[in-house]
Image (spheres, rainbow, N blue to C red):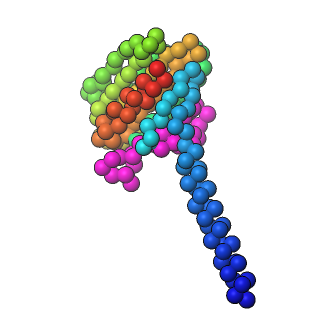
Amino acid sequence: MLSFLSRRFAAVCLLALCGVLAAADLRAADPATFTISSFTFKRPAQWQWVPVTSSMRKAQLHVADPADPTGPGADVVFFYFGAGQGGDVNGNISRWIGQFEHPEAVKPVVESADIKGSKVTRVRVDSGTFNSGMPGGPTTPQTDYGLYGAILESKEGNVFIKLTGPAATVRAAAKDFEALVQSPF
């Protein structure tokens, strides 16, 4: 009888260990790099890979708040629609800024640069009331939110990157966001 119980206990322990290892393996499978269109991005190691839930999103990352890792954190979403799709750069920047209540008051910063032959346009809103939700659908006002965005232009189609979340979390992620934007170059 003891032998049967010992074997059963060992089997249960083995199954539990396999479950733990499988969960660790899934986390380890988060890609360090990922490609969208002609750009290969390097994910900041502390940013968590999030499975996409929409066909419009090509990748999504979660940024934990360094001051409150259990808090809501911020999200980085990548969009790519193909050559000639997704709207022009200025229209997207205007739409992103327009997601804030009183967009004229949030003092957005928009900058364009050429990085190794590719045009990159960045937008930054340090703080305001952000209306989260799908365009044309219901929105939820989020106070003291920030947005960092970048549009990488290419012949294959633009890649749109948008970081939104609590303003302090977004500001804390600024250096990693810029490294992510520049990683394909």
Quarter of image, res 90: top left
77 inside magenta stretch = no
Left or right of 154? Residue 73 is left
| Quadrant occupied by the N terminus | bottom right
Residue drawn 59% across and 16% down?
156
Left or right of 169? Residue 78 is right
55 inside magenta stretch = yes
x%, y% of residue 135? 49, 31
x%, y% of residue 14? 65, 68
Residue 174 visible? The answer is yes
Which residue is more in the foreground, 5 or 176? 5
Q: Residue furthest front?
A: 3
**How many numbered callouts?**
0
For the stretch drawn in magenta, what is the main secondary structure? loop
For residue 11, above or below residue 56: below
Residue drawn 28% across and 28% down?
106
Residue drawn 61% across and 65% down?
17
Residue drawn 60% across and 20% down?
82
For residue 148, above or below residue 89: below
Residue segment shown in magenta: 48-73
x%, y% of residue 179? 39, 29
Residue 96 visible? The answer is no
Which residue is more in the foreground, 73 or 98? 73
